[in-house]
Image (spheres, rainbow, N blue to C red):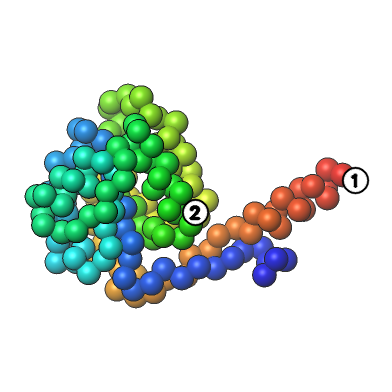
Amino acid sequence: MVEDNYIYFTIGKQKHIALIAHDGKKQELVAWVERNADILKNHFLCGTGTTARLIAEQTGLPVKGYSSGPLGGDQQIGSRIVEGNIDFVVFLWDPLESQPHDPDVKALLRIAVVYDIPIANNLATADFLLNSVYMNDEYQRKVENFNKTMKERLEKFSR
């Protein structure tokens, strides 16, 4: 495994889904969750600050809340991805509004890509992912073996 180019992780049938939305997108996300409650009730939901609270209050679904995005919630979600505790992210970010925590948002998006986590940034993508054949089945995600990559880079530069 140490010498493999990739490491494979299984996303189980029951997904751990992070739900995040900037202020201008929160009601869109709540409405999406309401429309898809029959599917989402079979998975573990979490989210940042106000978004998690609004979803739980307005849909009745259990949602584990983390801190607000600007107060570190995006980073908390990112750390859960690294730990292997989040399988899927729906993050409705507002492209027309500047965010004071933009570096945290970019870090979360980056970590989702590094760990090969499905991430929807708009409702169309969220709908496609939620209705994918993989939602009710296991999925093998492929993550680059960065230990091997770093070892190879060190060997290359030490020559």
Q: Is residue 60 visible?
A: yes
Residue ID at (31%, 46%): 66
Q: Secondary structure at mark 2?
A: helix
Of residues 54 and 153, the one drawn nearer to the viewer in this rendering: 54
- State the image quarter where residue 23 is shown: top left
| Contact check, label 1 and label 2, Cβ < 8 Å | no
For the point 46% across and 49% down, the residue is 79
Q: Amino acid at mark 1?
A: Arg
Q: What x and y, as percent, mark residue 150? A: 72, 50
Q: Position of residue 78 (x, y in %)?
A: 43, 47
Which quadrant of the view contains residue 13? bottom left
Q: Position of residue 151 (x, y in %)?
A: 76, 53
Q: CA distance from mark 1 to mark 2?
A: 32 Å
* Residue highlighted by disc 1: 159
* Quarter of the picture holding the C terminus: top right
Question: What residue does disc 2 label?
Answer: 82
Circle 1 or circle 2, nearest the eye: 2
